[in-house]
Image (cartoon, rainbow, N blue to C red):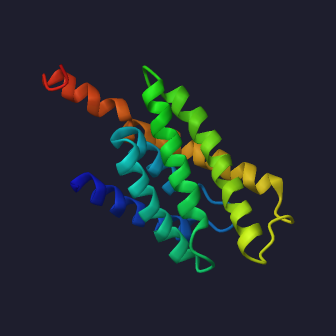
Amino acid sequence: MKAFFSYLFIALLAVSAQAMLFNDTKPDLVLVLVFFYSLRYGHVSGMIYAAVTGLLIDSANGLIFGPKIVSLVIISYAASSLRQKLFRWNVIASTVMIAFFSALDILLVYICFEIFTDVSFTSKLFGTSLMQVVYTIIFGLLAYPFLNPEEENRTLYQAGEGV
């Protein structure tokens, strides 16, 4: 529970930092946090964390509730499912998955807005979305040493608890 609230506080800081530091194209800092949290803590905890952070983003967004919640919960479930299927997790797998999930997140949010609102993203440039994915990858690479899902397992194993 302590980790959940720690990650939630970091997500709140990330949402604030995104709003203050970036104007047009922003990295999705919360997506990276949800990704790593889901890898580390599994399906249920990851999806709860994704739903709460998605609600945080949707409420800060001020448009409609749901698009970010839906996309982050789907990404959380997919990330934790992939984690169970891969034997070793490394920076390359993490980078590829963050790139894929960032693009998927953008697509899911666009689809939700197209279906449920009269806000259209058809005029939004492809380059802006591509730059958002690139910025998110960069943040993911910077965050990897701190949020590495294998680090906790390695520490437990060295302490004799993972045997």
Q: Tag count in the figure?
A: 0
Above or below 92: residue 44: below
Q: Nearer the viewer, residue 19 or 84?
A: 84
Q: Nearer the viewer, residue 51 or 126?
A: 51
Above or below 38: residue 123: below
Which residue appears at 37% of the width and 35% of the height?
149
Q: In the shown orientation, is residue 7 left or right of residue 65?
A: left
Viewport quadrant of the C terminus: top left
**Residue 90 percent across, percent down from the top left:** 46, 26
Above or below 96: residue 121: below
**Residue 50 percent across, percent down from the top left:** 45, 56
Q: In the shown orientation, is residue 26 left or right of residue 46?
A: right
In the picture as drawn, the residue positioned furthest to the left comes out as 160
Quadrant location of residue 114? bottom right
Q: In the shown orientation, is residue 159 left or right of residue 150?
A: left
Viewport quadrant of the N terminus: bottom left
In the picture as drawn, the residue positioned furthest to the bottom comes out as 62
**Does the rendering let one see residue 155?**
yes
**Residue 138 percent across, percent down from the top left:** 57, 43
Which residue appears at 37% of the width and 49% of the height?
44
In the picture as drawn, the residue positioned furthest to the right comes out as 123
Q: Nearer the viewer, residue 137 or 109?
A: 109
Which residue appears at 82% of the width and 63% of the height?
124
Q: Nearer the viewer, residue 17 or 117?
A: 117
**Residue 67 percent across, percent down from the top left:** 61, 65
Which residue appears at 40% of the width and 49% of the height?
46
**Does the rendering let one see residue 14?**
no
Q: In the shown orientation, is residue 57 left or right of residue 150?
A: right
